[in-house]
Amino acid sequence: MGILSGLGRWLGPRPPPEPAIRQAIERAVEIVDPILKTVSGYERKLAPAVSHALGYCEQLAADIPGPIEINARAFSADPLVHALFAAPRDIGDMLGKSRELREFLADPAQCEGDDFFALLGMRQREKAVNGIALEGGVLRNDVPQRLLYFADHTLGELGCRHENTRQRLQVVAFDGLARGFAGCVAELRQERHEARTAWNMEQAGAAAGRAERRQVLEERQRQAVASLAPASLLQAFVDWLMSPQERLYLKPTVVTVDRMGVISRQPETGDNFSTLNFPELVGRDRRQWIVLVARISRQDARDALLQQEQANRYLLI
């Protein structure tokens, strides 16, 4: 009886996904295309891939550096913070101009701790300059140099607890994977539209001796239509989620700079040089963001928002 009951469990239907997996599946399907729900057993088919992708995103979120204090004191003491901002006032400017921060502090449901946490993202930039450098014991002017700086600072996923911020980052990463696939689906739909248009134009101007061309267009249209069939989309989405490291990953970056942000191409030592380690978050579009988890003083944030409000009022007057 035990063997027969065990065989029955093995041959029978798999149990439904856990609530957290089912919730992630539903969110992903809505992002990609609700038509996936028309595939029989779509939850069961997606569950292993979604579970795998969630585990990857959890590790990715854990690998983002931080929490790192972002304030004027850190600008003086932490070489990384010093490199991320041109001057201490730029930290206040970033905070004061953040709509996400304004909404976060205005929400009475948020806790009233002294600090809060956020994902800080920015773009890495380099600029060619001419500066002063010591070469062969001689101080020279107009030496070609590369200056490291960062732009487009933005705050997101604000929260009162560090662990909650990490959890939100996992969700954001997973949703990013789904949106990346949704972008592929949009491209497939565009390909289908172009194939249909090309076929219609060919039919309208059909002429003898162009049978081979029409066959090519027919095949192109057939492939485009087949790739957008719900079952085909579902399988492609499963394959996509099973290889998340190819779609979204952290690219380690190491760079040595002096206190002025001038990049050193040679290993340097001494108090004037710092070796910075930070990751770049690379997604499907290959646009790279420097990311870290920041710890921010609530009072600093309030002061920055107040200063920005006063500056805006002055401009209106």
Image (cartoon, rainbow, N blue to C red):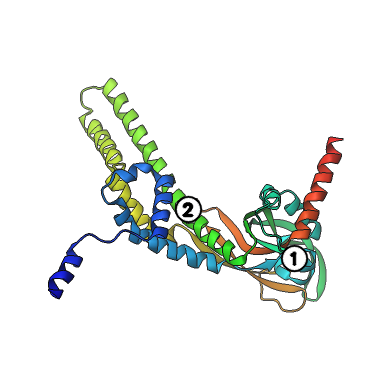
| In the foreground, 8 or 47 | 8
Please identify the residue farthest to the front as the structure is shown. 1
Which residue is pictured at 57% across the width and 63% down the height? 164
57 relative position to 141: left or right: left
Sequence-wise, the earlier of marks 1 and 2 is 1
- Badge 2 density bin: few <14, some 14–19, many ≥20, Cα 10 Å: some
Locate residue 22: give its quadrant: bottom left
Q: Does residue 233 appear in the picture of this structure?
A: yes
Quadrant occupied by the N terminus: bottom left
Element under label 1? helix
Identify the residue under disc 1.
82
70 relative position to 285: left or right: right
Which residue is pictured at 71% across the width and 56% down the height? 128
200 relative position to 31: left or right: left
Locate residue 303: give its quadrant: bottom right
| In the foreground, 315 or 138 | 315
Q: Position of residue 208 (x, y in %)?
A: 20, 23
Count numbered badges in the picture.
Answer: 2
Residue type, numbered disc 1: His
Residue type, numbered disc 2: Asp
Q: Position of residue 270 (x, y in %)?
A: 75, 79
Element under label 2? helix
Identify the residue under disc 2.
175
| In the foreground, 14 or 120 | 14
Quadrant occupied by the C terminus: top right
Which residue is pictured at 52% across the width and 58% down the height? 282
| In the foreground, 84 or 140 | 84
- Badge 1 density bin: few <14, some 14–19, many ≥20, Cα 10 Å: many
Q: Position of residue 126 (x, y in %)?
A: 67, 57
Q: Position of residue 29 (x, y in %)?
A: 39, 48
The residues tagged by marks 1 and 2 sit, at their Cα atoms, a distance apart of 32 Å
